[in-house]
Amino acid sequence: MEAFTTHTGRAVPLRRSNVDTDQIIPAHWLKKVTRDGFEDGLFEAWRKDGKFILNQPERKGATVLVAGPDFGTGSSREHAVWALQNYGFKTVISSRFADIFRGNSLKNGLLTVVLDQKIVDALQDLTEKDPEAEITVDLQAREVRAEGITASFELDENSRWRLLNGLDDISITLQNEADIAAYEAKRPSYKPRTLQG
Amino acid sequence: MGRTLAEKVWDDHVVRRAEGEPDLLFIDLHLLHEVTSPQAFDGLRKSGRPVRRLDLTIATEDHNTPTLDIDKPIADPVSRIQLETLRKNAADFGVRLHPLGDVEQGVVHVVGPQLGLTQPGMTVVCGDSHTSTHGAFGGLAFGIGTSQVEHVLATQTLPLVRPKTMAITVNGELPDGVTAKDLILAIIARIGTGGGQGYVLEYRGSAIEKLSMEARMTICNMSIEAGARAGMIAPDQTTFDYLEGRPHAPKGEDWDAAVAYWKTLKTDEDAEFDAEVVIEAAELSPFVTWGTNPGQGAPLSANVPDPASYEDASERVAAEKALEYMGLEAGQPLSSIKVDTVFVGSCTNGRIEDLRAAAELVKGRKVADGVRMLVVPGSARVGLQAVSEGLDVVFKEAGAEWRHAGCSMCLGMNPDQLAPGERSASTSNRNFEGRQGKGGRTHLVSPQVAAATAVLGHLASPADLSDAPVAAGV
Ligand code: SF4
């Protein structure tokens, strides 16, 4: 997992509430065999509409999604997070995320930032008016900054530590390599192995 | 205070324990198949990590594989890509793979035990919820998600929070004609599809002790349908006898050491379970499902229940919806339900003992007109064994189709599917809407009920077959 310390980028204001994971990535994409290549499936149905905000040329290369409340409801598919990341988003801001989506996002290094709806509104106003406006998400300082806006956000210490250090569960476990090796050394010889016999 | 079987196995696998953190558990055996592993291998590739313990990892192909024409290229391009991806991943990382056409290929939960890789006191995981099957040997076995698959590939461990324990004690002895499948369906109907949530189930009591390994696997297999991630049965002489001489079973001194350890794997007298359920085996009879979740079941001799009889509003609505989907009337005798298809197979009932039981009943009889009966061994080895016993001939002479090993009609991911509105009696484990094909209607049954149903054309128990003709001299 890539470390997340501070990120600055242009934004996509998405003024919809209750965006569920079926909208983020439709079910037929789940047959894919990779974590990559989901970018074209992201908001697939909405993107058929030429006026949808993601289709606007000035939003190209934007990395911050400023979403409505209750983002990521529905199924537990990790593919929703992969699709957002594949497309290029580094962080999603909303006043409320669905639990499972939030867990998945933090596991994969996509920082989900919870801010007051008033501040989310202000960020959407700003970036709607000015597509060039940048938003900074500073995990060190737990702060979101944009022109005329400074807001702090909460994130539990454990998740923050993992993101700042780019540690996924696997990296954390591998920090205990010595414990694993010690356990392996004392496993009885009668335990089966797949590569013999 | 004493410990339960689950607690003993758990404690024996703790790599690291720290305040405020989940335990880090060592995984003894990691089973892989084509559906849930691709993104996990992809993750390893991206982070440049190898598979930590290739010698504790094994893969097979099952969900997408066809059961006919297995020597021809796979027609569905999506299925083909999933299988090709597994083959490439196995080759790139050095994982032992049993692909379609290999003699050890088959449903992952049939293959592990039959090779002797599943043993008492082990932790077994797989990206598949029916991994609970392996608990029949007295280990902790459970399904995991794709991120966890990658975690196990990379570290051979998993951080896990200790589950609670539930004892399911089955006293007495199963009556004649009543099988492990009937028992587990009755247990699920009793505790509900969420009843086991958060627990490891331990099946115990005299009725369980008398069961064969195949029957024990059938029971543990469906623990997940009761909401539990794992089910287990303490190992005993039946377990040891099943394992002895299998390709990966310990040998010589190792065997003695292993058996000595395995004998310690039982719940202590003074251990306490967090919950307990007691069942009297003598009260059971052949059991079938009428609805669209595995908890919606009843004795075959009963009628389709009236939704109005449910006190709980959500259960009532669920029953109404189920009857509508299943095309059934409240009050109709279950034994009057006519079927189009009978499926014998899956990781629940695709083992040799299951095929023998079904064959014995169809022997010399004919599958009813208009009924299609599909017999699919759980693994290529089971298929070979059945052929050596002549079971394939028995099935074919009765008018059934004898197929190659795989998940087959257990789920609609390969060519074996129900058409919309078609009704099946199936020895598999899930009767969800569309599970066996879009619009398909599933009744879960034992292999014996499946066979009797195939012959009579409606849901039937072996006892109902006494009137059906048996050709002389067969
Ligand atoms: S037989 Fe059915 S339940 Fe078993 S692994 Fe295959 S699809 Fe899953």
Image (spheres, rainbow, N blue to C red):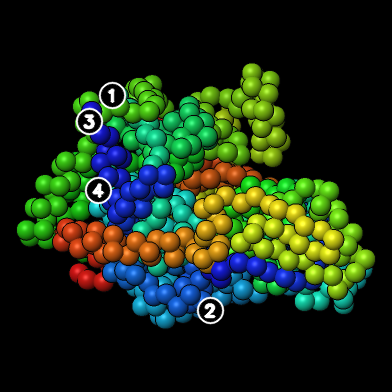
- Cα distance between the residues tagged 1 and 3: 25 Å
Q: Label 4, label 2: how many angstroms apart (C-alpha)?
A: 45 Å
Q: Amino acid at mark 4?
A: Asp
Local packing at callout 2 (Cα closer than 10 Å; few below 14, some 14-19, many 20+) is few
Q: Looking at numbered disc 1 in the image, what kind of residue is underneath it?
A: Gly
Of the pair B161 and B411, the residue shown nearer to us: B161
User: Mark 1 sits on what residue?
Assistant: B172
Please tell me how crowded label 3 is: few (under 14), some (14-19), or many (20+) other residues with Cα within 10 Å: few
Q: Chain of mark 3?
A: B
Circle 1 sits in a helix, a strand or a loop, which is it? loop
At horizontal 16% and vertical 41% (from top left) the residue drawn is B264
Q: Residue B2, which numbered label? A: 3
> Is residue B310 among the parts visible in the rendering?
yes
Assess whether mark 3 and mark 2 are in contact (beta carbons under 8 angstroms).
no
Q: Mark 1 vs mark 3: which is more N-terminal?
A: 3
Q: Chain of mark 4?
A: B
How far is the residue under mark 2 from the one under mark 1?
Answer: 51 Å
Any part of residue B123 in sight: no
> Marks 3 and 4, how far apart in space?
15 Å
Quadrant in the rendering for residue B168: top left
